[in-house]
C-alpha cells in the first residue's frame, strides 16, 4: 500500500492514499466564527465549499505552522452511515510517500479513547510512524457541525 507521510509536531503519521482525493498547497481558507475546536475553516474546491480540519490544533492544541511543506490533504471522509464528504486536513511537512503492507504495522499497546483515529505503528531508521484513520477522526458533535444539512430559507 502507498501512504502519504506528514508531521504533527516532531512525530510522523501516515494516511492511506486510497482515501486521498488530492494534496493541495496551503491555500487561503475562510475561518468560521465559533467553529468547533480543530476546525480551521473552509475553502473553495471546484466551486464547492470544503471544511478544513487543522490536525495540529485537533491533536496538539496549537495551530499548524505555515510553511511551504504544510499542505491541505483532501480526503474522502466516510460518515458512519456511509455518506462520503470531501474534508481538508492540514498536515505539516507533507513531503513524502512510503510503501508498507498492513502487516508491517503493529498495535502501540496504548489505547486512547479520545483519539480513536490513532492506528497502529510501523518503524523505519528515523523511528515510529503512526497510521491515522480519517473516518475515526471527527467526534460526532464535529461531524454534525460540518456535514449537517442546512436548508436556506
Image (cartoon, rainbow, N blue to C red):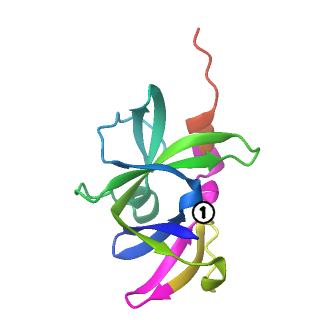
Q: x and y percent of residue 92 in the render?
A: 33, 62
When asked about the image quadrant of residue 97, the answer is bottom left
Residue at 37% x, 87% y is 126
Which residue is found at the position 77% from the left and 44% from the top? Answer: 81
Task: Single out the residue that lies furthest toward the right.
Answer: 81
Task: Please say whether residue 92 is one of the residues in the magenta stretch.
Answer: no
Q: Secondary structure at mark 1?
A: loop
Q: How many marks?
A: 1
* Residue 106 in sight here: no
Residue lying farthest to the bottom in this orientation: 125
Is residue 141 at all visible to an observer of this figure?
yes
Instruction: Say which of 118 and 83 sits in front.
Output: 83
- Which of the 4 quarters of the picture holds residue 18? bottom right
x and y percentages locating residue 94 in the rendered image:
35, 63
What residue is pinned by disc 1? 133
Residue for point 53% across, 60% down: 17
**Split into 4 quadrants, where in the image is the C terminus?**
top right
Instruction: Please state, as top left, top right, bottom left or bottom right, where the N terminus lies in the image.
Output: bottom right
Q: Position of residue 10 (x, y in %)?
A: 34, 76
Q: Is residue 45 left or right of residue 102?
A: left
> Which residues make up the magenta segment?
123-142
Query: Around disc 1, counting alpha carbons within 10 Å, would you say few (fewer than 14), some (14 to 19), or many (20 or more)?
Result: some
- Residue drawn at the location 61% of the way across and 52% of the way down: 139
Depicted 86 relative to depicted 9: above or below: above
Reply above or below: 64 against 131. Answer: above
Q: Quadrant of residue 41?
A: top left
Amino acid at each position: 500500500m502507498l501512504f502519504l507521510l506528514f508531521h504533527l509536531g516532531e512525530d510522523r503519521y501516515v494516511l492511506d492514499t486510497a482515501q486521498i482525493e488530492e494534496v493541495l498547497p496551503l491555500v487561503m481558507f475562510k475561518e468560521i466564527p465559533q467553529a468547533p475546536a480543530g476546525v480551521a475553516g473552509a475553502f473553495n474546491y471546484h466551486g464547492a465549499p470544503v471544511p478544513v480540519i487543522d490536525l495540529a490544533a485537533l491533536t496538539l492544541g496549537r495551530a499548524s505552522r505555515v510553511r511551504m511543506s504544510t499542505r491541505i490533504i483532501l480526503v474522502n471522509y466516510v460518515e458512519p452511515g456511509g455518506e462520503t464528504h470531501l474534508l481538508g486536513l492540514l498536515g505539516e511537512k507533507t513531503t513524502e510517500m512510503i510503501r508498507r503492507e498492513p502487516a508491517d504495522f503493529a498495535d502501540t499497546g496504548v489505547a486512547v479513547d479520545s483519539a480513536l483515529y490513532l492506528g497502529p505503528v510501523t518503524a523505519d531508521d528515523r523511528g515510529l510512524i503512526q497510521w491515522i484513520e480519517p473516518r475515526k477522526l471527527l467526534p460526532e458533535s464535529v461531524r454534525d457541525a460540518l456535514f449537517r444539512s442546512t436548508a436556506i430559507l
